[in-house]
Image (cartoon, rainbow, N blue to C red):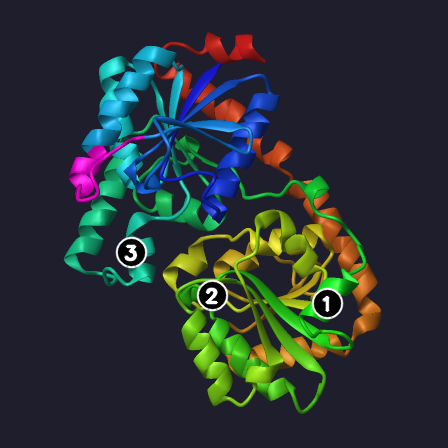
Amino acid sequence: MRILHVLDHSLPLHSGYTFRTAAIVREQRALGWETFHLTTPKQGKSTGLVEDADGLSFHRTPAPDEAGLLAQMRFTAARLDELVRALQPDVIHAHSPVLNALPSLWVARRRKLPVVYELRASWEDAAVDHGTTTEGSLRYRLSRALESFALHHADQVTTICEGLRGDIASRGIAADKITVIPNAVDAGAFKFGTEPDAALRTELGLDGKTVIGFAGSFYGYEGLHLLVSALARLVGRFPEIRLLLVGGGVQEEALRRQAVAEGIADRVVFTGRVAHNRVQKYYELIDVLAYPRLPMRLTELVTPLKPLEAMAQGRMFVASDVGGHRELVRDGETGFLCKAGSVDALADTIASVLGNREAWPGMRANARAFVERERTWANSVGRYQDVYQRALATRGREALLAGAR
């Protein structure tokens, strides 16, 4: 079985998107399938037409810097057609955004190949979050129409969570055409119950401190300004409390200014971006992780990876009750949920967790068991077997996958 994945971007860039992709293809290879990987011009500058990263090879699509979206899709289609002729894949697996799906459909129809389209987040909602459009605008409606077109014309559709499954179904896509391949983690990659790195704790000025923390990208929808405000409200109850913000992003300068304005700049530690293979060291310094995502369409529909990583490590965490978190977190059993958008609710929930440390061992065990039982990549990726079987069947090639098992 030969699968050609079409991707927005990939390793060595680091994002939830690239980590999910790497996990998928590694598990597919463990099943005995051959995988090939093409990125679009969105990858940016590369060292050549093929680039190796973390043991995987990625074919690149060169394009001029000034190429618009339509031109980018044409470059992607040309490069994809070239690879299809050379690699002879059985399935083209396009991953969102729709800028990847449309060239995949063009090439696949010409080459008589099935297309699986994986919607990880809708293009129009991502544009709203990035501030490049507004919900209901002409661009928003056009983006949504293109996304719906791709979903209707793909042979099979996969997505990452039930929230997005519902949105896809609302566009008139048949239920038996949609499969959820949920986000997961490699539980073995996360250590459970490890003692913190004493030298790192001292270096960051956290000796003897109660540490609230966040690790990830500082996007607006993460609601980190609420976390800074919550810290200011917790100082009176927990004089030794500190906030550890691991990562970086567009909101970093605003958060720094806010910490100064709220008089807690000396209690907020910004680490800057940290290499992925060192992030666990920082996790281990944190008493309670916080994920205060704001309520908006994107966060209501899409499940993040971070709570699963926290559960895999047996970390205590608090998350806002947006739909993407509710789908992952069993409140009071594997983590805690609080009212989204509320500083008071966030501060009160963190205080409650800190005041009930005797319950932590049981919750940590529950969280780790949940991940091992329901959210490993091996379990998740195994679902592609039936998806590819159905996609191949639309082209009269169903025996291919059966022979590859």
* Amino acid at the residue labelled 3: Ala
Q: Are marks 1 and 2 in contact (CB under 8 Å)?
A: no
Q: Which one is nearer the viewer's eye here, 52 or 255?
A: 52
382 or 203, which lies in front?
A: 203
Q: Residue 106, can we see it? A: yes
Residue position marked by numbered label 1 in the rendering: 201
| Extent of the magenta region | 61-73
Q: Amino acid at mark 1?
A: Arg
Direction from residue 213 to residue 91 in the image, left or right = left
The secondary element bearing badge 1 is classed as helix
* Callout in the foreground (1, 2): 1
Q: Which mark is residue 222?
A: 2
Q: CA distance from mark 3 to mark 1?
A: 38 Å
Task: Give the number of the disc on residue 216.
Answer: none
Taking 302 as reference, is 223 above or below it?
below
Q: Residue at x 44, y 11 (%)?
A: 398
Task: Decide if residue 331 is on the left or right side of residue 394.
Answer: right
**Number of marks present in the image shown:** 3
Badge 3: how crowded within 10 Å, few (<14), some, or many (20+)? some
Q: Is residue 239 left or right of residue 133?
A: right
Q: Is residue 171 above or below residue 358?
A: above
- Residue type at mark 2? Glu
Residue at mark 3: 127
Residue at (57% x, 29% y) in the render: 26
Q: Position of residue 7 (x, y in %)?
A: 38, 35
